Image (cartoon, grey):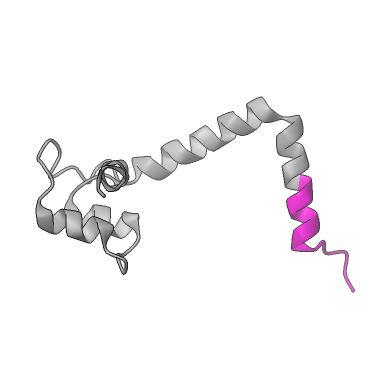
Amino acid sequence: MGGRESAEVVRKRQLRWREQHRKEWRQLRAGQKRRYYAQSKRNNRRKGKRCTPVEDARITAKDRPPDRKLSKSMGRSMQAIQQRRSCLP
């Protein structure tokens, strides 16, 4: 067997590093989130317009596509979709 580590060993090491370097981890994670959400900020065709009942249904559907695809098809950012979903019953 090679010197490969199991996923469990790697995960424990990552969590230990995060615990020891909290400030660095927060900065790293914030950068990851910024880059992820920046991808859909260009999808702003509907910015400032209220969501329609059809859009609300798509946002809350059980078999909905991932937010990234919804963002592209609806012309709204992923953050707008997530915020709208949190406001709906």
Q: Residue at x 50, y 40 (%)?
A: 32
Q: Position of residue 18 (x, y in %)?
A: 70, 37
Q: Residue at x 25, y 47 (%)?
A: 88
Taking the magenta stretch, the answer to whether it contains residue 31 is no
Q: Residue furthest top?
A: 23
Closer to the camera, 63 or 43? 63
Taking the magenta stretch, the answer to whether it contains residue 11 is yes
Q: Residue at x 31, y 41 (%)?
A: 79
* Magenta segment: 1-13
Please give the count of numbered marks on the rendered protein.
0
Question: Image quadrant for the N terminus?
Answer: bottom right
Does 18 appear above or below 8? Answer: above
Left/right of residue 19 with respect to residue 88 in the rendered view? right
Does 16 appear above or below 2? Answer: above
Does 30 appear above or below 5? Answer: above
Q: Position of residue 65 (x, y in %)?
A: 31, 64
Left/right of residue 2 with respect to residue 80 in the rendered view? right
Closer to the camera, 59 or 2? 59
Does 22 appear above or below 53? Answer: above
Q: Residue furthest front?
A: 89
Left/right of residue 23 with respect to residue 43 in the rendered view? right
Q: Position of residue 11 (x, y in %)?
A: 73, 53
Q: Residue at x 35, y 60 (%)?
A: 66
